Image (cartoon, helix red, strand yellow):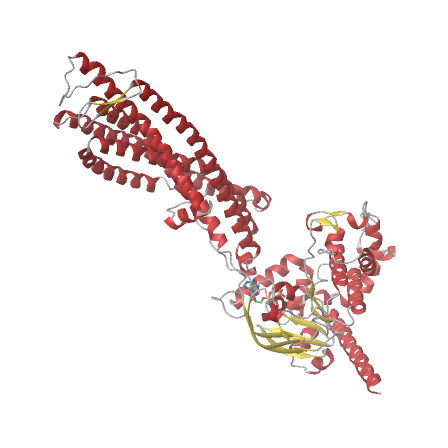
Amino acid sequence: MENANILAEGSYQELQSSGLDFTKLLKSSEGTTDDEIDTTNVINNSPEQLSNLSRQGSIKSIASSIDENKLNGTQAEPVEVAETRSSGKVSHSVYLSYISAGGNSFKISFLLFICIFTQMLSTGGDYWISYWYFDFYFIYQVNLEDNVFRNTESKSMNTNNFMTYTISDSHWVISRQCCVIVYTVINVTLIIVVFIRCASFVSVFISTSMNLHTDMFNAITRATMYFFNTNSSGRILNRFTKDIGAIDEMITVPSMDFIYNSLSLMGIIAVVGIVNVYLLIPTFFIGVLFYYTVVYYLSTSRTRSPILGYMNASLQGLSTIRAFEAEEVLSREFDNHQDLHSSAWYIFISSTEALGFALDIICLIYITILTFSFLVVENDIFGGDVGLVITQAISLTGSLQWGIRQFAQLDNQMTSVERVLEYTNVPQEAELESSQDKKPPKEWPDKGQIVFENFYLRYSLDTAHVLKNLNIQIQAMEKIGIVGRTGAGKSSLIGALFRLALNEGNITIDGIEIHELGLHDLRSKISIIPQEPILFTGSMRKNLDPLNEHPDHALWNALEEVELKTIVEDLPDGLNSKMSEGGSNFSVGQRQLVCLARAIVRSNKLLVLDEATANVDSQTDALIQNTIRNKFRSCTVLTIAHRLNTVMDSDRVLVMDAGTVVEFDHPYNLLKNKDGFFYKMVEQTGTETSELLHNIAVESFMNIAQENNELTT
Ligand SMILES: Nc1ncnc2c1ncn2[C@@H]1O[C@H](COP(=O)(O)OP(=O)(O)OP(=O)(O)O)[C@@H](O)[C@H]1O
């Protein structure tokens, strides 16, 4: 195929005789067919196995590397860490963090004050009515009964005046007009305060969500690479969508209801205590009974089944399930999850009903105790107060049930807060900016000399070192090829330069120890072309020059170097044309060329190629190799080699095995050692290819020797 057109089709012989690009390609790579074998797998495989591998394609090659990993035992890929539970008991510190995320202590105290004040006004209004009724009783009832007052010291009474009268030593009577005015003031104030309370709640809840989201976002963007290796992107997105969604929507209403109901309960207890302090004794015992009922209920309402997660995963992997004809197994597993889910849900409904019944009984007992206490205990409690206490206690029944259900929901949803808080505390990378006294000069690195000294690397504190005691000196402008079997530590060596894992020991670039620098200062000075080309959503310009530092002509020149100029010119908006997500409107090879153009634009002294040509055709490979040779002549280039021919003309080849450097010299010198790793790797590519590779090495060695001679004469 070429440019999305079928140029030719037919058998191998037919295509061979057609003289099309296909046969040219074959001819150009005739000598390197075996060479296409991944060098990372060759050391321990026989030639027969290797040729089998190359024929069997990528699936086999993946399988072989997995087998190898299994055999070695030590080279396990990072395992995804277990997901935090989505239900269960939430600690008090989570509640505290949730509350403190709502704003400063003044804001939270104000909200608390306004809630208590609202409840005081509400209970005060009820209490005022009872007081009012008391006045009415004295003025109309008692006065009608021949002005017989207890402890009578009768005074003249004028109920129409806005005045108070002392009826006894201990009680005041207030005029009706005054009662109405006070009651109106209480209610109007209550309405205003309720509005203020609503506004405060909205403000606090919005701040809570925003702060939790921002904290998590900031923490994730600065998290170590190890975190991303052990947490899938789906899981991270889940926290930003589902958990933040729960904080936005599912927690707010239950929190408010719970606070209202708790305060209302306190209001009722206060009224009971004011009317008769001895009634607090049965209230206490009922409270204890009530507490244990609620604790029992909450523990049963937390059961969950992962049915939704299972369903989601099944839908996402539907094609795989069908391809492997695993529908039966999956539907059986789904049924099990469904059974668990249904039984948990049934328990939840039953326990909620049981709780309602238990609370009704408890409230009934309480109301009975209160009511009979007024009959049994001889005292001078006024009838209005009795009515007030009983009506308040009756209102307990509904509000308590609702409050507890809301608390159960709140407690369940609080796991979302816990999960968000967990991600705000993930391990962070080093500082982005260097301290003033360690700031590197603007032109650093101007030579490109790299020195590793007693260097070790591991991916987490509880795993073994994957790079061990490296002592490497790479001279300025050297072209270094890095080879080794899979898991030897080639990518880790590159990662060490970018400080992506836990580095121990020294790495010096042009005399500056990189661990003393800020990450921005370090990483912006090393260009990398990875195996998987990374393009951003946005314009072509943004992809070539993300920080907008270079003029247009520099970008066009870079595109010309990688032979993409005409393709970009043909795009509707040239440099401003939009790239799809991940650059999917470009082929893999073209994306790789854009990455190369980006590296050319940056013109750093250090370039790293991590198997950059592994996924491209041999023509693009040749173009990339040539461009690198020409454009990065004065740079230090580290190339992790996928195909041996790409590193045979390097100044030196670094052979790695099990995290250590086993050989490091010019390929010509390495090939002299017939017991060496590199020699064996070359030999295992087949007779023809190895001969070709030997020739490239000799030619390159001669060229270098000639250049050195010219320099000395
Ligand atoms: N992100 C990671 N977290 C934990 N261990 C890792 C990680 N990446 C690599 N390793 C481990 O480090 C060791 C070296 O891996 P590395 O990727 O550097 O090898 P490599 O030579 O580049 O292999 P390949 O050619 O297959 O890419 C392996 O044992 C691997 O399991």
For the question of whether residue 405 can be seen, the reply is no
Q: Quadrant of residue 113?
A: top left
State left or right for residue 650 relative to residue 160: right
Identify the image quadrant of the C terminus: bottom right
Which residue is depicted at the point 63% across and 63% down? 520
Q: Is residue 271 above or below residue 423?
A: above
Q: Quadrant of residue 277?
A: top left
Asked whether 162 or 678 is in front, the reply is 162
Asked whether 459 or 251 is in front, the reply is 251
Q: Position of residue 316 (x, y in %)?
A: 57, 43
Asked whether 20 or 315 is in front, the reply is 315
For the question of whether residue 360 can be seen, the reply is yes
Looking at the image, in which quadrant does ligand 1 appear?
Answer: bottom right
Q: Quadrant of residue 565?
A: bottom right
Which residue of the protein is positioned furthest toward the front in this rendering? 156
Asked whether 540 or 650 is in front, the reply is 540
Q: Position of residue 514 (x, y in %)?
A: 61, 71
Q: Is residue 90 above or below residue 141?
A: below
Which residue is depicted at the point 87% across and 57% down? 19
